[in-house]
Amino acid sequence: MRILHHLNPGFGQFRWVVLLLAVAVILPTVCLLWFMNEVVKNERIVVRQRLTTFYRNRLAEAYAKVNRQWADSCRQLERRPSLHPYRQFVSLTGQGGYQGFLAYDDAGRCLYPVVSTDPGTLARPSEDFRTVWEMEFINHQYERAAELYEEQARISDDHGRLAAYIGKSRCLAKLGRLDQAIAECRLRAAFSPIAETGDSRSLALIARARLLLLGWMQNKATPNAKDRTGGFRPDPSYASLYEETFRKLLAMLYSANGAGFALPADENLFLARKVLEIGQATGLLDKNADLLRGTSLPTLMEVEERSIRCAEQFQSVDLFREWQDDTLQPLALGESVLYGVIHRTTRGSCIALLGRDNIMAAVAEYVGTFEDANVDFRILEEGGRFVAGIETTSREPCAAGPLGRYFPGWTVQLFFKGGDVFERAASEHVAVYTWTGVLFILLILVSGAVAAQSIGRQVQLNKLKNDFIATVTHELKTPLASMRVLVDTLLEGNYRNPNQVTEYLQLISRENERLSRLIDNFLTFSRMERNKQAFQMCPVSPVSIARTAAEAVKTKLGRGHCCFETEIPDELPTIRADHDAMVTVLVNLLDNAYKYSSEDKCIRLSAGAADGAVCFTVRDNGLGIPRRALKRIFRRFYQVDRSLSRRTEGCGLGLSIAKFIVDAHQGTIAVESKPGQGSTFTVRIPVAP
C-alpha cells in the first residue's frame, strides 16, 4: 500500500472524495427512501381519516341544503284564496308529482275534495218532479212526460230548469226522435250559458247533459262507422258538434267556471272515467290534451281518487293537529303506505300525499352529492325501513346523520366502496411524494456528481501540478548534473588529452541541446494551458516541412546503429499551416521513434497526398505500444513506462504537444502499433483550397 501511495500520490485524495460522496450523497438518499416508504405506508390511514372527515362535513352541508330545498318545495302548498283548489291540484300533480291533495280554509272547512251527497248518480228529483219522474221511469209514458218536463221548466229555477230540459231530451230519445233530442239537449242544457255562472249542482247537470249528448250522437253512427281503435264515430253531420261537445266536457274537468264553482270531486272523477273511455276510443283525448295543462288524465284521476279516499278517512283537519308544519309523516291509506305533509298559513292549510319516488325526486340534488366513485349511500326512514340507495350491505358506515329536520327519524348512511377507494385517493398524494423524492434524489445525485467532478478536476489539477514539478525537476536536474560534472572535470584538469576535452565539450553541447528542447516543450505546454499559442497560418509546401524536420534530426539519427530513411516526393499539394509548428510535430515523432527503438534502429519518414489531404508518416521498428495505452499516449505527462528505472528520458509532453498543433491545423494524428513490432504515426493535414 505504501508503494501504491508513493507511485500514485492522488490515491489518498480520491479515497477521501469517495468517502465524501458516500456521506453527502448515499446517506441522504437512503434516508429519503426510508422516509418516503414510511409516508406511503401511512398515506392510506391519513386518506381514510381525511375522507371520513370530508364526508361528515358534506353530511352537515347536505343537512342544511335539504332543509332549504324541502322548505322551498313546501311553499307550493301555500293556500292562496285567489287560486281555485282544482288549479292548485293540477299544478301539484303535474309539476310536483304529488300523490294526493287536500285543502282547507282558515275555519277548517274542506275546500278540496268536496263530494256530492249521492256520488255517481243524478240528484233525485224534488217533490215538484216526482210525478213526471214516475211517469218516465215507472209508467214509460214518454210523450206525456216530455210535455210535463216542458211545463216544469217554465216555473223552475236554473237548477230545476236544467233538470227539466234534460228529462225532456231523454224522453225524446226514448221515443226514437234522436235528432230532436240532440237539438233540445244541446240548446237548452249541454250548451246552456248557466255553465259560466251556475253552482256545483248546475255544473253537474250540464256535464251529464253533455255526456248524454255524446252518447246520442254516437248512436247515430252507422254500423260501418267504426274507426281503427274499435270505437264508433258519430254521424258525419254531427262530427263537428261531437268534437265541440267532447272538448267542452273535458274543459269542465279539474277546473272552475267564471263564478268560481267546480264539479264535486266524486262527480268529476265519474265523468273523467267516461271522458277517458270516449277519448281513447275516438282519439279526441290526445287532440285536446292542452286542456289538461300538461298532465295526463289517468294521473289526475288516480291522484283524485286517492285524495277522496284520504278525505273520507280523515274527515276533519283537526286530525292533523299533531303534525308539525312541513314535516313528513307516514300515512297508511288502505294497503298503501304514503307520506303526508301539512303546510299551514293564516289563510288555510294544505295537505299533500307523497310516495317514496316523490320524496327522492324532491331531494334528488341532495342525494346526488353522495353518488360518486368513493362511497355508496343508503337512506332509512324511521324504524329502519329502507328508502333509497343500497338496500343491504355488510360494511360499517363511515359516516351517518339525519336527512333533515323535516324528516324525523330519517337517516342517511355512507359506505366506502372498498380498499381501492383509498388506493385511488392516496395514489395522487403518493405520486406527488414519489416524484418529489425522485426529483430530490436526482438533485442530490446531480449535485454529488457536479461536486465529485469539481473535486476530481481539482485533484487532477493538483496531481498535474505535482507531476509537472516532479518532471521538470527530474528532467532539468539530469542534464544540469551531467554538465556540472563535465565542467568540473575540465576545470580541475582531469583529462588525458585534448581529444577527451573535445569529447567532454561535445557531451556538454548535447546536454545543453537536450536542456533547451526540454525548456521549449515546457514553454509550449504552458502556452497550451493558457491557450496563448499562436500559429502563423500561410500556404506552405509539405515537402519543405518534411525535409526541414529530416535535417533537424539527421545528425542525431545518423549516429550509432540507426538507419534513417526518407521518402519525400518533389511535389505535393500546398497546405495552410505554420511551418515551424509542423516541423516541431515531425521532430517530436522522429525523436520518440529514436528513443523507443532497440539497438538496431530503422526509422522512416514519408510524405504523400490522398483524399484531399497531405499525410506525414513516421514508422519505426521499436518497442511498440500496448493496446490499452494507445488511447492515452496523447495525454499530457502520460508515459507508458512510469517506472523509476526507465531507460528513456522525457516528460511525456511530446505527443500531447504534437496533437495540440495538429488539432489547431484542423488535422488528425493516428497511431498503429503492436508490442515488439514498432509503431506507425500518421499526420493528416487538409490541402489548402
Image (cartoon, rainbow, N blue to C red):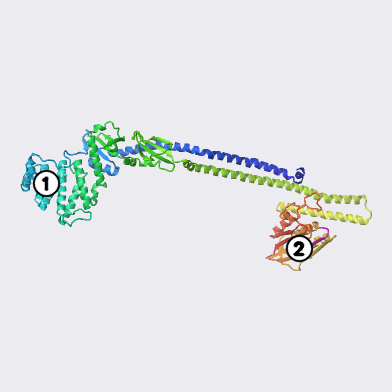
Q: Which circle marks residue 545 in the picture? A: 2
Coordinates of residue 563 in the picture (x, y in percent): 82, 62
Q: Amino acid at mark 2?
A: Ile
Q: Amino acid at mark 1?
A: Ile
Q: Crowding near pointer 1: few (<14 within 10 Å), some, many (20+)?
A: many
Q: Quadrant of residue 325?
A: top left
Q: What segment is highlighted magenta in the picture?
A: 598-607
Would you name the residue on which mark 1 appears?
Answer: 166
Q: Considering depth in this image, is 516 or 208 the residue closer to the camera?
A: 208
| Inter-mark Cα distance, 1 to 2 | 143 Å
Q: Which element is circle 2 on?
A: helix
Q: Earlier in the sequence, mark 1 or mark 2?
A: 1
Q: Considering depth in this image, is 170 or 158 the residue closer to the camera?
A: 170
Q: Which circle marks residue 402 in the picture? A: none
Residue 166 in the figure: left or right of residue 595 = left
**Residue 599 on the magenta span:** yes
Furthest residue toward right: 496
Q: Which element is circle 1 on?
A: helix
Q: Could one spot residue 534 in this view of the protein?
A: no
Q: Could one spot residue 316 in this view of the protein?
A: yes
Coordinates of residue 630 in the picture (x, y in percent): 72, 55
Coordinates of residue 236 in the picture (x, y in percent): 16, 56
- The residue that appears at 59% across and 45% down in the rendered structure is 442
* Quarter of the picture holding the C terminus: bottom right
